[in-house]
Image: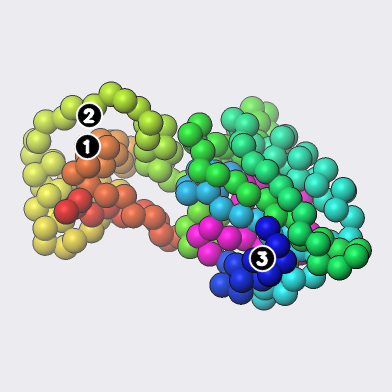
Amino acid sequence: MTLEEARRIVAKGEGLYTEFKTRVPSPDRLAREVIAFANTNGGRVFIGVDDEGGIIGVKDSFEEEFAIQEAVGLYCRPAIKWRSERIPVTNKRDVILVTVPKSKRKPHFIVQNDEDGSGPALVRIEDSSVEASPESVALMQTEYDPDGVHFEFGEKELLLMRYLEQYGKISVQGFAQIADMERDEAGKLLVTLTRARVLVQNREVRGDYFTIAY
């Protein structure tokens, strides 16, 4: 990518597919961004760009690239495909562009320094990388599943559809309340109906909700 191409992309600001960093942050923070892009629709991290879109570059490109390799290699599970390239800004400064494609091995999780090392999956919502809901994780796990979905339309399913026809959307907790179900049970039913393309999952920073798939 040329510097002019980078300027045009950066001018649009951070968003669903774009993140700015002045330099490589702590390994776990960078891993969160990479995981979120891989678990969603892919994206780019521009290192050497400030929050306002100022292209300042980094001095020590080799050190920054090593830090990227360490972060992605140590803190992302399963492993994520990515690539980096340098975009010269001046004779002494480069922007490092990290490109992360949408993964076919998702969900990816961040490794944490606790007893079992397991951490949350992340997804990209607008310009933020946030923890994925249990329903998002379940849908990622079955996104490339060739097997069909089988279910029966019972009382709870009919109650859900009547509610959606009247109010348009519902959260997992909301469905659990109106159907007198445990949250986990409500979430599993919503995932099943989403996999069957009866519903659509909609992600927001404040929480997921589901709508009818018209």
**Magenta residues (range):** 15-34
Residue annotated with mark 3 = 6
Where in the figure is residue 126, as x and y percent of width and height?
48, 62
Quarter of the figure with residue 157: top left
- Contact between labelled residues 3 and 1, with CB atoms less than 8 Å apart: no
The quarter of the picture where the C terminus appears is bottom left
Between residues 105 and 122, which one lies in front from this camera angle?
105
SS under mark 2: loop
- Of labels 1 and 3, earlier in sequence is 3
Q: Nearer the viewer, residue 93 or 193?
A: 93
- Name the disc covering residue 13, or none: none
Instruction: Assess whether residue 132 is covered by the magenta stretch.
Output: no
Disc 3 secondary structure class:
helix
- Residue at x 56%, y 53% (from the top left corner): 43
Return the residue at label 1: 196
Q: Looking at the picture, tell me which residue is in the foreground, 194 or 92.
A: 92
Rounded to the nearest angstrom, the CA distance separating label 1 from label 3 is 40 Å
Location of mark 2 (residue)? 149
Res 214 visible: yes
* Distance CA(mark 1)–CA(mark 2): 6 Å
